[in-house]
């Protein structure tokens, strides 16, 4: 029997993988993908909550509406983010975060 | 009597007019300039005789500053016997010295400037004499200081002259500051600056003895500066850097006597305070003795005479302090003649020896400079107080006064008389007798008539001005005391013994047999003052440098910048610039936040 707990564990693992990717990987595109992974981990937990919170035989759709919003915003974010990465690559000829540190003193 | 009412104005303004004309119009024509100046002073002299002979002149009085009832300054004249005599004295000696200057400054490139300054001095000095209030007197007092500065520094291209002029001006400034404070105190107490009104309201000051004493002593400060009394005497010997006629007129006969004149003029104020009188008498005594001691060891002919002037001014101040303005004025009157005579005689020696002033380079001048020698001798005898020369009578008046009032002062004054005879005979013996000690002295010859004439003219009053039947016409003589024969005999004895001792010591000498360093170095006053000034200035400079460098620059300005910079460089250690480090810290922050909100 699959319960809410199983979904949340999977969601937590996905988030952790994403977070670790953000922290540890050096390629900025991989970091970007890891960010998306973290967003989708959040989506998964929201959908799971929606499915398991049933009133009068119907799931709670509020969470699912929220997920749609997240997907929309993520799409916009990807468009902007990839554009920035392309511009950055053109300027610096690199996608490695270690080389992009001019904000340091 | 419109004309006599304006006469004092003419006397006062003629020299100013002459000075203005010379400066504005005739500066490039020295002959004409000197002519204008001499004519102006002669005219003033003639009109002074008219004023002297006319009783009850009511001069026109102008309002100068009118802030009634608190403050009112007229531009008015006082023409009592005192002022009339001073008018005659100043214009008379001034006229003689103007004529003498024609010879002395004949080839000087700054002749026009010299005569302009001289006329300006005459104007200022006459202003002091006739001023009827403190403010007017103070203004003229300062103008006299300015003209003295200009004339001491006449040969300003010589560093020593420029320095001496500055020294005279600054030293006088110290005294004048006290003078001004004293005037203000008198005004605060009585509400007036006019002498007669202060005298009228004198009770308002005398009811506060301490206030009165301080006020009188502050006013006396002005006289200390102008009459070069201890401890502000240092400027007068240096003032001898000026041309010799200036030394005779300003720094012997008239300007330095202004302090005495001023004290006599406000005698009513000073004599109301016994403490002030005591201080004044002792300052005068100290100056007289000290200057006479120094004079015995000087080698510059003009410096000897300068210290002699100091000493004689000390006598006058002493007389003022002994509450006898008459005795002071009597000595001022005779001293003006014989000291001007001595200076002019020294001047004609100096100019004939091509500006040689060291007495040990002279010698044997009696034969070649006959008239100069004779007149100089008259001046010397008058100065040391030999009967029947004028100085005997006036000095005797002061000595008798001291004998009666304060024995300590009397003995000091008597020893000063002894010293006076000693240093004057030293001067005469070394300069006029013996063998000439330099080529210049061998080649010297008599000065032209334009310089000899004034000597003869001055020798007459230097001899005769002391006889009471002559002096009585000009000054109020002090009442004859019961002193008897003792004081004159002692004074004459002191003078004679000093003179004989000097002749005995200095006869046929090639150099000074006595060498007393403290006297030769003028008791180290100049060294002491320059040390004090340097020490205090250095201290002040160091203190302000410390404040500026460490407190203002260091703590306030650099401190602010260093603090900001230090905090900034501490904070920027956090800015590693690594995106993932930021993300890690951000994550850590979130975890911490969750921990604290959920689990605590």
Image (tube, coloured by chain):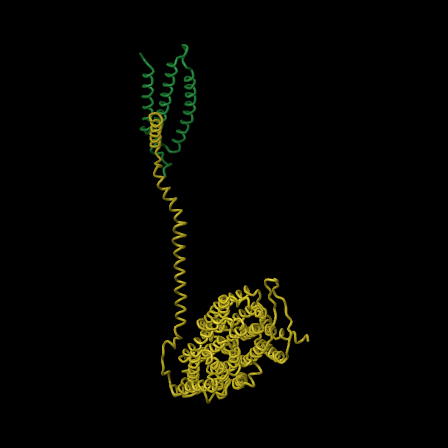
Q: Quadrant of residue B73?
A: bottom right
Q: Is residue B95 above or below residue A82?
A: below
Find the residue positioned furthest to the top: A57
Find the residue positioned furthest to the right: B1
Examine the rendering and report whether any part of residue B106 can be seen: no
* Position in image of residue B479 (x %, y %): 53, 82
Examine the rendering and report whether any part of residue B387 can be seen: yes
Tell which of B4 and B352 is nearer to you. B4
Q: Quadrant of residue B574?
A: top left
Q: Which chain is yellow?
A: B
* Position in image of residue B299 (x %, y %): 41, 80
Give the color of chain A as drawn: green
Name the quarter where the N terminus of chain B is drawn.
Answer: bottom right
Q: Residue at x 46, y 81 (%)?
A: B403
Tell which of B479 and B282 is nearer to you. B479
**Total residue callouts:** 0
* Position in image of residue A22 (x %, y %): 34, 27
Q: Residue at x 34, y 23 (%)?
A: A15
């Amino acid at each position: 029997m699959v319960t809410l707990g199983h979904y949340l564990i999977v969601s937590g693992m996905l988030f952790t993988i994403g977070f670790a990717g953000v922290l540890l990987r050096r390629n900025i595109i991989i970091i970007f993908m890891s960010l998306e992974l973290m967003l989708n981990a959040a989506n998964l937990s929201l959908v799971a909550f929606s499915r398991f919170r049933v009133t009068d035989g119907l799931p709670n759709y509020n969470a699912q509406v929220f997920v749609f919003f997240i997907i929309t915003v993520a799409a916009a974010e990807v468009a902007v983010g990839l554009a920035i990465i392309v511009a950055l690559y053109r300027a610096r000829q690199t996608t490695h975060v270690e080389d992009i540190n001019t904000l340091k003193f | 009597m419109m004309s006599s009412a304006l006469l004092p104005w003419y006397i006062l303004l003629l020299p100013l007019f002459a000075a203005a004309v010379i400066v504005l119009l005739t500066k490039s024509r020295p002959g004409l300039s000197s002519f204008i100046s001499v004519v102006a002073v002669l005219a003033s002299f003639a009109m002074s005789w008219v004023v002297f002979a006319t009783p009850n002149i009511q001069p026109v009085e102008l309002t100068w500053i009118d802030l009634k009832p608190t403050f009112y300054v007229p531009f008015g004249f006082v023409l009592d016997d005192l002022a009339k005599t001073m008018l005659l004295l100043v214009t008379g000696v001034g006229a003689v010295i103007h004529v003498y200057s024609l010879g002395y400054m004949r080839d000087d490139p700054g002749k026009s400037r010299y005569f302009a300054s001289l006329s300006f001095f005459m104007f200022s000095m006459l202003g002091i004499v006739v001023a009827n209030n403190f403010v007017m007197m103070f203004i003229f007092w300062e103008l006299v200081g300015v003209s003295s500065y200009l004339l001491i520094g006449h040969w300003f291209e010589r560093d020593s002259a420029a320095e001496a002029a500055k020294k005279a001006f600054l030293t006088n400034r110290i005294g004048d500051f006290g003078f001004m404070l004293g005037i203000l105190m008198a005004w605060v107490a009585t509400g007036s600056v006019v002498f007669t009104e202060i005298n009228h309201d004198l009770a308002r000051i005398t009811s506060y003895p301490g206030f009165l004493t301080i006020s009188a002593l502050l006013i006396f400060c002005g006289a200390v500066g102008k009459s070069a009394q201890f401890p502000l005497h240092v400027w007068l010997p240096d003032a001898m850097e000026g041309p010799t006629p200036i030394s005779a007129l300003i720094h012997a006969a008239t300007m330095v006597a202004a302090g005495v004149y001023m004290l006599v003029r406000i005698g009513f104020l000073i004599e109301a305070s016994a403490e002030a009188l005591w201080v004044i008498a002792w300052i005068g005594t100290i100056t007289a003795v000290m200057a006479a001691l120094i004079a015995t060891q000087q080698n510059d002919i003009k410096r000897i005479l300068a210290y002699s002037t100091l000493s004689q001014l000390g006598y006058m101040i002493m007389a003022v302090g002994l509450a006898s303005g008459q005795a002071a004025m009597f000595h001022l009157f005779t001293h003006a003649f014989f000291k001007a005579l001595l200076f002019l005689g020294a001047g004609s020696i100096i100019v004939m020896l091509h500006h040689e002033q060291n007495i040990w380079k002279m010698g044997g001048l009696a034969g070649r400079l006959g008239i100069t020698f004779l007149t100089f001798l008259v001046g010397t005898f008058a100065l040391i107080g030999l009967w029947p020369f004028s100085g005997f009578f006036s000095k005797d008046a002061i000595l008798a006064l001291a004998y009666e009032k304060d024995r300590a002062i009397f003995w000091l004054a008597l020893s000063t008389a002894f010293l006076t005879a000693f240093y004057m005979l030293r001067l005469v013996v070394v300069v006029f007798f013996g063998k000439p000690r330099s080529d210049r002295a061998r080649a010297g010859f008599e000065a032209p008539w334009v310089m000899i004439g004034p000597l003869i003219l001055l020798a007459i009053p230097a001899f005769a001005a002391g006889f009471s039947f002559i002096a009585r016409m000009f000054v109020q003589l002090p009442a004859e005391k019961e002193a008897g024969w003792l004081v004159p005999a002692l004074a004459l004895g002191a003078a004679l013994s000093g003179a004989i001792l000097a002749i005995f010591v200095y006869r046929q000498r090639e150099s000074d047999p006595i060498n007393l360093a403290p006297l030769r170095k003028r008791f180290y006053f100049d060294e002491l003052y320059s040390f004090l000034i340097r020490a205090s200035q250095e201290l002040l400079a160091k203190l302000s440098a410390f404040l500026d460098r460490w407190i203002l620059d260091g703590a306030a300005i650099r401190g602010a910048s260093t603090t900001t910079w230090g905090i900034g460089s501490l904070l920027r250690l956090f800015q590693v610039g690594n995106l993932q480090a930021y993300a890690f810290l951000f994550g850590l922050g979130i975890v911490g936040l969750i921990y604290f909100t959920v689990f605590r």
